[in-house]
Amino acid sequence: NVQGDEPFIETEVIEAIFKLTQANKNNPNIIMNSCYKSISNPEADDPNIVKVVTDKKGMALYFSRAKVPYPRDHHFDSYKGHLGIYGFTMKSLESFCASTPAPLEEIEKLEQLRALYHGYKIAMIEVKTESFGIDTPEDLKKAIKHHRL
């Protein structure tokens, strides 16, 4: 599932998500597979760039439009920007679609929070990509310029 606001996701990223989904297909706790890229501190301030925090095994702990984690007492510069691509098995997609929306999903407008709310895992991998989402008129201008459309 590639989100419509991510038209420039490279084939290599799609293949990486496919491989991750295949590797996790027999784990009933993992309902989704997705990816992130490293983003800069200023990018982490942008609410249109969804941030993800992961555990030591690469499972998503939380997604937010806010800057997470928040560097309260020290410098932090290892932000992860979530890309709008998901890998599902047929069974996990059916389970996800049958689950009820979550309160945090409604607040942040991020459907992946539904999976976490219901106790499922989301496996994450880091990818190298030049792709970016198109969520604002400024993003569209950037896309036109960058891709000479």
Image (cartoon, rainbow, N blue to C red):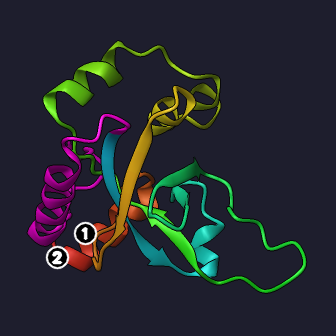
Above or below, 117 relative to 66: above
Type of residue at label 1?
Answer: Ile
Query: Which portion, as a residue range, is magenta?
Result: 1-30
How many labels sit on residues?
A: 2
Q: Secondary structure at mark 1?
A: helix
Which image quadrant: the C terminus?
bottom left
Q: Would residue 58 be visible to someone looking at this image? A: yes
Per the image, the residue denoted by label 1 is: 144
Q: Secondary structure at mark 2?
A: loop
Residue 94 in percent (x, y) is at 24, 20
Q: Residue at x 68, y 62 (%)?
A: 67
| Quarter of the view holding residue 145 | bottom left
Q: Residue at x 19, y 25 (%)?
A: 91
Q: Residue at x 46, y 78 (%)?
A: 38
Above or below, 108 relative to 47: above
User: In this orientation, which residue lies closer to the viewer: 105 or 90?
Assistant: 90
Q: Are marks 1 and 2 in contact (CB under 8 Å)?
A: yes
Report if residue 27 lies within the magenta region.
yes
Q: Is residue 15 left or right of residue 66?
A: left
Type of residue at label 2?
Answer: Arg
Q: Residues within 10 Å of mark 1 (few under 14, many from 20)?
A: few
Q: Would residue 133 be visible to someone looking at this image? A: no
Report if residue 9 lies within the magenta region.
yes
Residue 43 in percent (x, y) is at 57, 73
Q: Residues within 10 Å of mark 2 (few under 14, many from 20)?
A: few
Label annotation for residue 104: none
Per the image, the residue denoted by label 2 is: 148
Residue 37 in percent (x, y) is at 40, 73
Q: Residue at x 63, y 77 (%)?
A: 42
Q: For the view shown, which residue lies furthest in the right direction?
A: 73
Q: Is residue 43 left or right of residue 37?
A: right
